[in-house]
Image (spheres, rainbow, N blue to C red):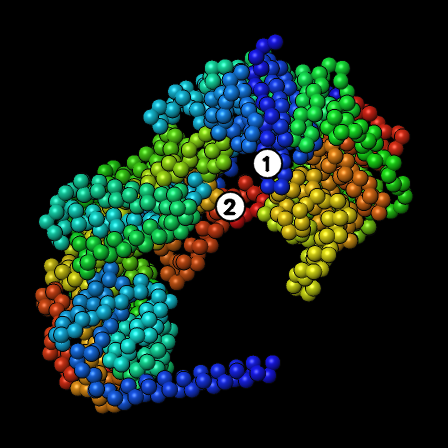
Amino acid sequence: MKSSATIISLSLMAAVLAGCTEEAGGDNAAAESGSCESADVRLVGQVRNESNPYEASWLAGGDAFAQSVGLKQERLTYDGDSTKQQEQISQILAGDTKCLVMNVLPNGDSDTAPIVKGADSAGAYLVTQWNKPADLKPADHKTWLSHITYNGVESGQQIGDALATAIGGSGGIIALQGVLDTAAAKDRFAGLEASLAKNTGVKLLDQQAANFSRAEALTVTKTLLTKHGDNVKGIWAANDDMALGALEALQQAGKAGKVAVVGIDAVPDAVGAVQKGDMTATVSSDGTWQGGIGLAIGYCVATGKLKAADIAADNRAFFAKQFLVTKDNAAGFATPKTNPADFECANVFNRVAGPLT
Amino acid sequence: MSVPALEVRGLVKHYPGVKALDGVDLVVRPNEVLGLAGENGAGKSTLLKALVGLVAPDAGEIFVRGEPVRLRSVVEAANHGIGMVFQEQSLVPNLTAAENIVLGSEGSAVRRGVYRWDTMRRLAQEQLDKIGSDIDPLARTDSLSFAERQMVEIAKVLRIEERSQHPPVIILDEPTSVLESKEIETLFAQIRRLREFASVVFVSHRLDEVLDVCDRVTVLRGGQSVGEVATAGAVPGELHKLMIGSTGSDDHYHSGAASLVAAEQPRLSVRKLSGRSFQEVDLDVAAGEIVGIVGVHGSGREDVCRALFGAEPTTAGEIRMDGKKIDLPHTRAACAAGIGYVPAERKIEGMVGAMSVADNMTLTKQKARCTGPFVAPKKQATLVDRWIERLSIRTPGRDTAIGRLSGGNQQKVVLARWLVGGDIKLLLLDHPTRGLDIGARSEVYRLMRELAGSGVATVLLADSLEEAIGMADRILVMSDGRVVAEVACPNGGKPSPLDLVKEMV
Amino acid sequence: MTLTSAVATAPRRQSRRGASFRDAGPPVALVVIFGIFAALSPQFRSVDNVQNIVDAAAVLAVVTSGITFVLMMGSIDLSAAGVMGASALTVSLLVANNRNDNDYGLLGIGAAVLLGCAFGCLSGLALVLLKVPSFMATLGVSAIGLGVATLMFAGVQPNITDTMLESWAIERFLGFSYLAWIAAACILVGWLIQRYTRLGRYAFAIGGAEEVLTLSGVRVKPYKVAVFTLAGAFYGLGGVMVTSQLGAGLVQAGDGYDFSAITAAVVGGTLLTGGRGGILHSAVGVLLVMVLTNGLVQVGVSPYWQGGVEGLIVVAAVAAAVIPQRRRNQVVK
């Protein structure tokens, strides 16, 4: 009995010691930032899936950056499954992590913490995008270099204003909301409300959730068109998929071109529609840039061209610049491509629109 | 003598640990009704299964019209003209009667996968005409009564006549066990009609029936044929003797053990109970008393029984146990008040087939096997073993799945479920001996007497009038949902079945 | 037994053919719910909106027709989402589109439906040969379908330019879109299969009592595979119809249709245990669900409330529908 207790306490001690050493190793890796040869850097990009244009362009951007530095990006997709994402991360971290750079789209806010923790203790360089809990800050971590997101209130307002202009400042509009309990849906709709407060002539006739889905937007829009008839002058959609569904509904109702439609995300079809004049506006977060920039920041730190300690506090978590796409500038967004200059180590924070508050 | 329609010589079938068939011989002559009698476990069902290709015998031969055959499936058996009406009905409930009749041999009724309903109805009608049934071939099977479904089943089996181009051999496995007497009479008329063009093998545990309808009876015991009796002039006692190897006890119902009922305050008292199919039923049962309720199908007696257990909604009336009112009838309240219910549909409502004997026995009275919220394995084992012994339940062990026991032993486990708690006051027995053979019945009867002797009040829905008369101290007759008569039924002063029938209609 | 002749059963014959009143629940619920919405909202009862409901019901009706056969058999099918996605991408890449120079028109549509058949067949084979429960087998096939669709998607959404396929969603005949007529045709075909073919009747019978079929010498397995294949064809067509509606081939074309279709079928009175219900029941179920979603928007229920309200009404409708069948201590799983 006594001896077994001894063994247990010994092994516990050993475990604690091992944990300490490991942590120390992590510290070393961070301290040694800059020691990696360019060829030793391992680039990983992780998104939900490749089956939608936005995330596909994200991975394409990552490939483009990797190619520019003579490397290959490892593509990971987790089908919107939080468990699967965590498994993939721990698998990656179980390998050689010394010069590992990860550009990750966490599935939801709560998925960010374990990823950060894993990267921290393994000494892997991490950039996250879109989702994180407010109280979790990259500045408190050594290798979590930055968190990039976009101001949904701003984009919701931008397209709201564009819609108001398109219908001549007065008339009824309907709003298609995303999945109601997501931050993106809430922020974007708050932006619309701000826009409505400014454009007093515009009246919100109805708002329905179409869950970011093209098919649901089609059905809901058709229903709302029969409900409100010709009073509908404009349709505000919280993303482009729903905007495209609304366009189909207008076409099927014989109202194509008579109602203005706006969306967010600048997926290729939406940009095309803007170019043709079917859609009024969309907002681009520039998915290819997102895919490249996370890897670029990590690569710069890993190879010593940028010191983690030197990154300004405001740049550790920031809103990136987004672009209103209208008929005038749509051509430039039609074929998404990366600009190598964006990924120069001196320029990686050029698109900071403001600190994440 | 003509060539037998079907002959079995020296059939042997082993199951692990059991020799189900030990060299059975059987001869079925053309145009005769052969009875097959034997206690449960005598090998009847294994023999029947071998005859329709569901069981492959280890040794022995089967001859059809003098030709040796091997039967590997129901279809092969059918092609040789052998068909069986299964004890558990084998019709698809949600198809029409016609589809069931032609199922598997649709012939011209289905061309290139497309149904031709007219042809199908005609084919089915031809079969129904053979037995003179007026069932609508296009009626959904589950809308038919049990007896009607049996007719459909016979019609279905008769279709093998066209298939084999020979007079068929029709096997009826316990066809009467769930029929009312009128329906049984109709069935017997059918069997006599079948004899005109077919051979029939009739299996029943009711010896009087066997003697009534059969020309000849073969008795099985221990997997062997132990005797053959021509039915003309034979009496049940003779058959019974062959079946069990000695003369059966005359006092089948253990009347000697009947307890004397003290006329005190009734244990169960029901006043003006009304429900969906019964009205203003009054019923008193004293401690130690067995009260039978009889009535034809649709008299409402099953529903009354279920209502007492709270398993059937009531609209008015009250139920008191020992003077205490059970309000809001509910199965839980009934259990708590010491009422136990043995349902008629044993396999569906009475037991959980895949669970062990022990678990089935302690299903209701969880407390009896638990310490706090946890099952105490030792406590359960001791308890269960005690009851297995007391009721002489034949089972390999307490952990055997109940579904593998014979019907009689299953029923004993179901009964034991109410006894293990030690607080049973009233037992509701809904056809407790249905499907059991004589030996098993007798044991259930003995058990009922024993329980009554210990003060348990019993309400019995008997399988037959004889059973009700034999067991009950008092009989209530129900008709159209009302109690129409009460007949005292003391030892030595038993009424005749006819007395009761007079009241029933 | 000596007392036989004296006892007579009361002559009690009821209508035993065709629809009995226990099937009347869902249609009654449909009429009641339609009536309530019509009373509450003038827009709801407009001709435009009725057309709108029927148009919106088209795809769900086709998918539900397919799933109904599987449910009747007592199996379950969760492959609709994946099969529809694969079929949507297939058809959008085979008819005139912006990704390649294909222009196979009807042939392309046929190919997409055949692909659906193939996926259905795969589910069926996994069920009968590998003995994988239908729940898991079809879930796996759905994942395969989504995988195939993602491969074909390859990062760029194919937009269709085929005028015929586009016209399905836009052109109207007697007030209803071509899609609605296609759905009606599917229901008719489904009904004919269910009523007049061995496949349909056996699917029904398998759900009722599979072991009886075996005892009667029927080989059940081929029919199971055939039923899944048939269902796959319906899903394939459903994917084509979504593509026509959205004007593009989406991997997500079938998102949510698996569970909506099962819901619609069950609301219509097709039991998950098999052996009950049928195509016409399911059609009523589809209309019920569509009337509900449309009506809640028309009467102006807040989107924050709709999900909950819709769920409540569905449960209430199902409960009302099964009241005539509820008896004694019937066990419900």
Q: Looking at numbered disc 2 in the image, what kind of residue is underneath it?
A: Ala
Secondary structure of the residue carrying tag 2 is: helix
Query: How many discs appear?
Result: 2
Q: Looking at numbered disc 1 in the image, what kind of residue is underneath it?
A: His
- Residue at 37%, 76% (x, y): give it: A114
Q: Is residue B210 above or below residue C86?
A: above
Q: Position of residue B414 (x, y in %)?
A: 69, 45
Q: Position of residue A248 (x, y in %)?
A: 21, 53
Q: Where is mark 1, residue-wise?
A: B14
- Looking at the image, residue B164 sits to the left or right of residue A58; the answer is right
> How many angstroms separate mark 1 from mark 2 (CA)?
53 Å
In terms of depth relative to the viewer, which is nearer, A276 or B56?
B56
Q: Position of residue B73 (x, y in %)?
A: 48, 29
Counting other residues with Cα less than 10 Å from the Cα at mark 2, is it few (<14), some (14-19), or many (20 or more)?
A: some
Outermost residue toward the top in this view: B1
Q: Where is mark 2, residue-wise?
A: C320
Corner quadrant of residue C201: top left
Residue under mark 2: which chain is it in? C
Of labels 1 and 2, the one closer to you: 1
In terms of depth relative to the viewer, which is nearer, B11 or B86?
B11
Q: Which quadrant of the figure contains the C terminus of chain B?
A: top right
Q: Is residue C6 above or below residue B392?
A: above
